[in-house]
Image: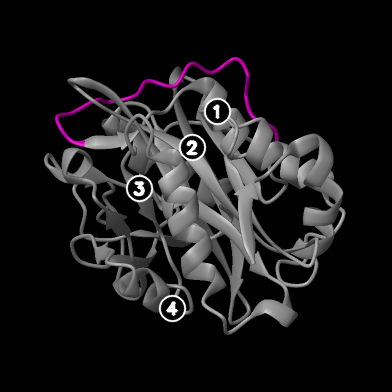
Amino acid sequence: MEFRPFNYGEDLQEVLALFGTGLSKTGDRSWFDWKHRDNPFGPSPGFLAEMDGKIVAARFFLRWRFRNLAGTIDAIRPVDTVVHPSARRQGVFSRLTRYGLEQLATPGLPPVYNTPNSNSLPGYLKMGWEVYGEPLPYAYRLCPPFGNFPQATVGSHYPTEVSPEVTVTDRYRTDLSADFLRWRYAGPVYRFATSTASRSALLVYRMLSVRGLRVLSVSDYAGPAALQEGLTRAAARRENCYLVHTLADLPEWPVGNGGLRKKKGSSLVAVRDAETLTATGLIFSPGDLEDVL
């Protein structure tokens, strides 16, 4: 088995077909271009495993960027990996991941992090990765329709007239920008709420169905902290939905004061050799942890 870098012009169609054996993305070039070519942080490096002249595995690393008061730091996220059924149970996942990281290590490996699921986490732990901090919990809560909150404009297209105000602290969080938010939340599942009184606030959310109940799931927010809860309530009222799902127990992502809370589920973050990145701590939005990426 041989490993080599991915070549977009020569390998794309075969890789897309390979994705169809494990990721259900066969032939979906628009998805690939959006995720791995149009990312404002840069195109994704990819690496392949070949056997008898055929590509049997592919591994891509999504470029990411964090910002704090001191500036920005680039990182990479191992994301889409697929191994053809004929090459499974041979350690290809770990070997291809190590190969990719070795290729990216010159002149210096950027911090690496990921949000693995229960299937992929054991593989990362075997490679020496560690779970960062505690699992981040989510909560369902009631969001009452009454109270004083801003009038909101709600739509399914990114509001280009909005200039989100981003709060920067001494802790690292995703480097939000209008270009990033427009790219990251380009999918049809996302909706956007803005305050008619302030063009500096943007709420990104999805509408979910949980056991027959409509749920407003917050994905991201950029803007003054004082407007977040009111804009969430305004969006919930516009959607005629008063059950909200978001991160719980994090000061940066308050679940508000309305109604009952019930923790449900959690997300894991795994890191490798990321002392620089984790020294001051990380802040994640719900969107950073969604399995969409």
Q: CA distance from mark 2 to mark 4?
A: 23 Å
Residue 130: quadrant of the picture: bottom left
Among numbered discs 1 and 3, the one appearing first in the sequence: 1
- Mark 1 and mark 2 lie on one chain; the one further toward the N terminus is 1
| Residue 42 disc label | 1
Instruction: Determine the secondary structure under disc 2.
Output: strand
Name the residue rendered at 53%, 55% in the picture. Answer: 79
Question: Is the C-beta separation of discs 1 and 3 under 8 Å?
Answer: no
Disc number for residue 257: none
Residue 118 is marked as: 4
For marks 3 and 2 on the same chain, the one whose residue lies earlier in the sequence: 2
Q: Residue at x 50, y 28 (%)?
A: 41
Residue 3 at x, y percent in the picture? 61, 56
Q: Nearer the viewer, residue 33 or 215?
A: 33
Of badges 4 and 1, the one in the foreground is 1
Identify residue for label 2: 63
The quadrant in which residue 198 appears is top left
Q: Label 1 to label 2, Cα distance in Å?
A: 6 Å
> Identity of the amino acid at label 3?
Val
Question: How would you classify the magenta stretch by its main secondary structure?
Answer: loop
Q: Which mark is residue 112?
A: 3
Q: Residue 20, position in %: x, y?
A: 80, 66
Residue bounds of the magenta highlight? 156-171
Q: Does residue 158 show up magenta in the picture? A: yes
Instruction: Determine the CA span between mark 1 and mark 3.
Output: 15 Å
SS at circle 1: loop
